Every structure is written in C-alpha cells, then in structure tokens.
C-alpha cells in the first residue's frame, strides 16, 4: 500500500516542514551565538600574590591560534586541516650586512641582535607560544588541557650561563603547565591533580544525525495469518543538538522521524508516519555548579599561556646571557693569541741573540738549548691558543645563525669590535635593593606564582567534586502520527484515533509535524536526579592530594625566593672580586713589564743572563694572559648580576616584541662596552688594553 497525497496537501506539508527546520536552525544559531559571547567574556584575573609584583613585557604574536577559524562564509573551514608554515632555516640578512671582504665585523650589540633573529634555542622556544594558544583554544571548547613545556632550551654549545651550580636560574620548567594526570615534575613538584574535577559538557554545540533504511521480512507463525511473510520497511531520520554552558547547564534538543510500511493486515496504519521532539535543559545544583569547576580548563590554559610568555622571556635572558659570555670568550681568545704570539716573537728573538752570543763564546751552549726549549713551549702555547680561537669562532657562528652550511659563512672570519670597559668607579647598590629588584623581575618567580594560582583554581574545583551530584531538569516535547488509516479499523468517529476520523483516513507528513506543536500529544515534565557516592573515598583522596600539591608549590616558591637572594648576593660578590682581580692583574702586568725592561738593561752590561730574560718574558706573558682572563671574567660577572636581578633585557635595551617576531628593529645596547677605538690593522680585533695610566 502506498501513501499518496493531493498536491495542495503536499505543498502545505512541505511548508510546515520548512518552517520547523528554520525554527530549529534559528534556535541552534542562537545557542551558538550565546556560547560565543560566553567565550568572549574575559576570564577573571588571577589573585595578586602577596609578594613583589612581576614586570612582564607584552609580547607580539605573528598568528593567534587561540581563536577558531571562522565558519562564515566558508562553512567547511572548521573541518579542514590548517597548514603550519615550514620552519625558516635561513639566516637573517643582518649577517650579510656585517660581512666585509669575507670577514664579519661583530659588535656585542650585533651579536645579541643576531641571536634574537637566528638562534635556534630561541626559535624552538618561540613555538611554545603558539602551542599554548592551541591549548587555550582547546580549553574554550570544554576539553581538558594537554599542557605546554615551559622549560628552557639549551642546545647551543658554548658559553657558561650563570646561576648557582652552573644552572640557569631556578625555573619550574614543564611542571607548572603539566596537564591533568601527569605525576612528578621538575624540582620535586607533583601536578597529578591539576585540572581534575567534575565532568564538563562540551561548550561547542554538537549536532548528531542518524539516517537509516531497514527492510525486515519475517515469516508468519500464525495459522490465520493473511500473508505468509510479513514485510516491513522502516525509514528513520533522527537529529539531536547538545551544548554545555559555563554555569553547569546542559541543553539538548532531539527530533526523531520514522516511516514504516508493512504488508501485515493487523496494523492500523500503513504506511505509518511518526515524529517526536523533546527540548531538555539540565542544571547541576551541587557538583559542577558555577563557573569555577566548568571554566577551570580555560583559566588554567590562560595561566599557562601567560607562563609561556614568561618562559619565553626567560629563554631570551638565558640566551642573551650565553651569547654575551661567548662574545667575551671570543675576545679573550683573540687577546690570548696576541699575547702568545708576542711571547713567541720575543722568545725567538732571544734565541737568535743567544745563538749569536754562543758563536762568540759569551754564553755557554746550554743557554741556547734553554732558549730553544722556551721557543718550543711558546709555539705549543700559541697553537693551543689558535685552536681555541678557531673553536670559539665556530661556536659563535653556530649560536648566531640558523645554518652554518653556507660556505661563505663557514669560511668567514669573525672580528669582534667591542672592547671591555672597566668603569673608574663601581656603582654601589645596597644588596637589599638588588634583591628587591630580583624578586620583582625574575621570570622564574613569575612562573611559580602563576603556577600557584593555577593550583589554587584546581584545588577549588577538586573541592567542588566532593559534593554529590544533584541535577535539576525540565523538558517539553510532543509527538504526532500520520499515514493511511486502514478502513476496517475505523468505522466511526468514536473509535478513530485523532487526527483521523471516518471521513479523514489520510494524514500527511505536514499534519504529523503540526501535531508536534499544537498540543495534541504533549510530553513535559520536571525532575531531580541525585547521585550520592557512599564513602566518597576517591573524591576525598583527590581533594587532600590537591591541597598537598598546592602547599608543596608554596614551599617551592619560598625556596626559589631564597635561592634568588643567594644568587643576587653571589653575583654581587663576583663583581667585586673580579674587579679586584682585574686591578691585581693590571699591577702584575706593570710590574712584570718593568722587571723585564730593567733586566734588559742589565743584560746589555752583562749583569744578567738570557735565561733570566726569558723567565721574565714568561712571567709577563702569564700576567698579560691573566689580565685578559680577569677582564673577561669581570664582564661575565656583570652580565650575571643583570641576569640575577632580572634586569638583563632592560639594561641591554632588548625589545621582547622583536624577539618574538625574530626580527630586530631596535638594536640592543649592551652597557659597559665601547666600540673600536684603536687603530688596529684591518682584520684584527679591537684591543682591550687598559685605560691610560695602566689602571683599570
């Protein structure tokens, strides 16, 4: 039996169906817009810690992955993979601008700028910013966070970075941004309860649909059956819409349709058309109530994004510290080669003079052997110094470039053009003032404080999960039927089911849809659902564990502050000590040079020997080498003091926005260095000779 309707009824049914579908679409769109407005609301700021404030510069991102791709006007865009650009492995044009005649003339300011543009440690850390963006986008859907590694990348060889025990500060690394379920992290911190709590219904609307065609033939088992095989064809079209909101509210809408055609003579309608819908709203009243447990992932992800900014700043500080140390190592290597070359030149001259004197018999032959031994030793020292210089050049080029495969760069010589400058008077700053600066600027402390706030949010969410589950719900729906009424089943209006009667035995799909909303068969109700876990041991353990992890993080923060205080005092001691070492080394050089000059005068009148002169020259060489080493150590100690106080980037004039983009528009200005002042030959490094008068 087939269902056939007159054309006007078919048009009316089509119009009713279209109106219903438009109504559902408008409802879904309104819910989606409400969700977007909820997303757009700013997450409440973290409470201000009861410690010194932290100064963090605003960063600039090339692409914001925390926002979803717009679906309008391209509706399929959210379901297509988003391509991420290949990493840029080419060097910035700044290297070419510094190269002349196959040599790179490099000031310390240019070295820092090149590191900000090309250093691969910074490039690796830069990806963490966008990875944190994706975690934030994921959290805004109601999903759990995956976590971001906020540790420091140190894969660039060369240069010693400060901190107690040779470590870089005391950052909390990946522990502070670990996702839920991760156990022990760095520094002994445990993050296993971070993010756990009551379940969250997806904030992203979800539409599900089932379209099914079923043909079912069943052999009859009754004697009086009209047909031997009962055939039934069922067509199903079901739709559902679900969405969660920040207050623990869940919305669901279901719309189900079926069309059943059967050849059985025992059915009232064939084919039978039925539809029903239900609008249900559920509200958590105890566990899962309010924005705190439902927005916890968003707030933690936002904190993790802030931690990523702070960690990137710490990465810049670490790398700049390393680059400046490497630069002064390179300057020392050049100066040491110069010292060893001068020592060898003097030893060779002494050897030639000794040979001439031995020929005329004024000195014994043993002095020639002694002079030859000194020359051999000095040659070995020069080779070692030259090899160390070549290694330092290679390390610097690797640290300041993305790739050293370029043959021009690989063969290029590096000429440092900045000189060490020892101020006449050292600025005296009280240790407590330096410590206060460090407590307000150290990135490691900022990370720990933000992490403490995330743990506090998580602890409150876990505390909410202790409560039983009590949900209030309300729903409204309706149903309708249609099809062709079997005449034998309806002889009068009193026995005909509505909307059928003895004269109206056919109801189309439009009439079926009309029954959904006209109150013919409403379905409505309200209720409560209560779930009480007896003993509740899992929730109790989670709550206590979260509190313990929070207290553990508090102790760690206090430990970090103590360590920062020690680092600042130690860095201040190093500056004083190294300045005194420079002064002592300068006096030693002056004394050694005067002694050598005096013995040269004695040698002219025969009051001393060539052996004594060579010994004096060896002492002078050692003194000059110690002076250069002391100056390099002094420069490093000042860099370390800036790092320990957290002011390295501020004092060097480094713009975090430039570092984030990997393109320096404001050249850094490293303090306490001067450009090339001497008239050294082309291709020679700038001299680091002391100021006039021989005083540092």
Image (cartoon, rainbow, N blue to C red):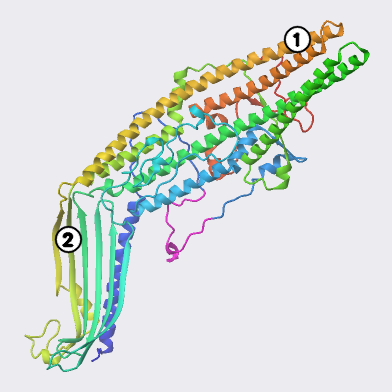
Number of numbered discs overlaid on the protein picture: 2
322 part of magenta stretch: no
User: Which x, y percent locates residue 200?
Assistant: 28, 53
Residue 235 picture quarter: bottom left
Residue 601 picture quarter: top right
Residue 14 picture quarter: bottom left
Residue sitting at the far right: 360
Q: Nearer the viewer, residue 356 or 173?
A: 356
Q: Residue at x 27, y 45 (%)?
A: 292
Q: Is residue 397 above or below residue 516?
A: above
Is 549 placed left or right of 318 in the picture?
left
Q: CA distance from mark 2 to mark 1?
A: 101 Å
Residue identifier under label 2: 474
Predominant secondary structure, magenta span: loop
Q: Residue at x 67, y 15 (%)?
A: 586
Is 552 placed left or right of 446 in the picture?
left
Q: Would you say residue 349 is visible in this rendering?
A: yes
Q: Is residue 663 above or below residue 553?
A: below
Q: Quadrant location of the C terminus?
A: top right
Q: Residue at x 86, y 6 (%)?
A: 606
Of circles 2 and 1, the one toward us is 1
The span picked out in magenta is 62-84
Where disc 1 sits, the SS reads: helix
Residue identifier under label 1: 595
């Amino acid at each position: 039996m087939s269902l056939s309707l007159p054309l006007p009824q078919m048009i009316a049914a089509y119009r009713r169906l279209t109106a219903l579908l438009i109504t559902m679409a408008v409802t879904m769109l309104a819910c989606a817009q409400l969700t977007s407005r909820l997303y757009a609301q700013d997450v409440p700021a973290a409470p201000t810690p009861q410690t010194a404030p932290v100064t963090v510069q605003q960063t600039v991102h090339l692409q914001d992955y925390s926002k979803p791709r717009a679906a309008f006007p391209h509706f399929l865009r959210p379901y297509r993979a988003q391509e991420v650009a290949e990493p840029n492995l080419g060097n910035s044009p700044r290297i070419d601008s510094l190269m002349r005649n196959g040599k790179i003339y490099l000031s310390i300011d240019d070295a820092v700028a090149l590191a900000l543009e090309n250093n691969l440690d910074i490039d690796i850390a830069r990806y963490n910013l966008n990875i944190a963006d994706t975690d934030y986008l994921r959290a805004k859907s109601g999903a759990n966070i995956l976590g971001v590694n906020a540790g420091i990348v140190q894969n660039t060889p060369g240069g010693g970075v400060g901190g107690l025990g040779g470590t870089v500060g005391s950052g909390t690394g990946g522990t502070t941004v670990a996702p839920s379920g991760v156990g022990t992290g760095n520094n002994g911190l445990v993050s296993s309860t971070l993010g756990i709590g009551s379940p969250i219904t997806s904030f992203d609307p979800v539409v599900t649909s089932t379209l099914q065609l079923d043909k079912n033939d069943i052999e009859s088992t009754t004697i009086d059956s009209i047909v031997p095989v009962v055939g039934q064809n069922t067509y199903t079209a079901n739709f559902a819409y679900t969405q969660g909101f920040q207050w623990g509210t869940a919305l669901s809408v279901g719309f189900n349709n079926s069309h059943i055609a059967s050849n059985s003579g025992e059915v009232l309608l064939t084919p039978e058309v039925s539809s029903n819908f239900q609008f249900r709203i559920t509200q958590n009243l105890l566990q899962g109530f309010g924005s705190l447990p439902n927005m916890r992932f968003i707030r933690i992800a936002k904190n993790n994004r802030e931690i990523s900014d702070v960690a990137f700043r710490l990465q810049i500080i670490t790398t700049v510290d390393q680059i400046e140390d490497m630069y002064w190592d390179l300057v020392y290597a050049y100066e040491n080669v110069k010292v060893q070359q001068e020592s060898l030149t003097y030893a060779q001259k002494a050897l030639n003079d000794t040979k001439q004197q031995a020929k005329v018999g004024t000195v014994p032959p043993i002095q020639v052997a002694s002079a030859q031994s000194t020359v051999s030793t000095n040659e070995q020292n020069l080779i070692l110094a030259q090899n160390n210089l070549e290694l330092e050049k290679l390390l610097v080029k690797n640290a300041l470039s993305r790739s050293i495969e370029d043959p021009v760069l690989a063969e290029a010589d590096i000429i440092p053009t900045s000189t060490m400058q020892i101020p006449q008077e050292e600025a005296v700053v009280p240790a407590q003032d330096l410590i206060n600066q460090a407590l307000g600027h150290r990135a490691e402390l900022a990370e720990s404080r933000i992490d403490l706030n995330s743990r506090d949010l998580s602890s409150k969410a876990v505390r909410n999960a202790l409560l039983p589950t009590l949900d209030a719900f309300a729903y409204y729906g309706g149903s309708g039927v249609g099809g062709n009424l079997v005449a034998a089943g309806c002889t009068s209006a009193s026995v005909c089911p509505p909307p059928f009667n003895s004269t109206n035995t056919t109801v189309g799909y439009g009439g079926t849809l009309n029954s959904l909303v006209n109150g013919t068969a409403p379905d409505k109700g309200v209720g409560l659902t209560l779930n009480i876990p007896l003993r509740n041991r899992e929730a109790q353990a989670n709550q206590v564990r979260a509190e313990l992890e929070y207290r553990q993080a508090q102790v760690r923060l206090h430990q970090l502050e103590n360590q920062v205080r020690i680092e600042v005092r130690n860095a201040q001691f190093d500056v004083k000590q190294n300045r005194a070492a420079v002064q002592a080394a300068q006096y030693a050089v002056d004394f050694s040079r005067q002694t050598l000059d005096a013995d040269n005068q004695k040698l002219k009148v025969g009051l001393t020997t060539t052996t004594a002169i060579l010994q004096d020259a060896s002492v002078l060489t050692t003194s000059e080498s110690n002076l250069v080493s002391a100056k390099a150590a002094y420069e490093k100690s000042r860099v370390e003091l800036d790092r320990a106080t957290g002011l390295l980037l501020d004092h060097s004039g480094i713009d975090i926005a430039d570092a984030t983009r990997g393109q320096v528009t404001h050249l850094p200005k490293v303090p306490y260095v001067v450009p090339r002042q001497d008239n050294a030959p082309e291709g020679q490094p700038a001299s680091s000779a002391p100021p006039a008068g021989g005083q540092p």
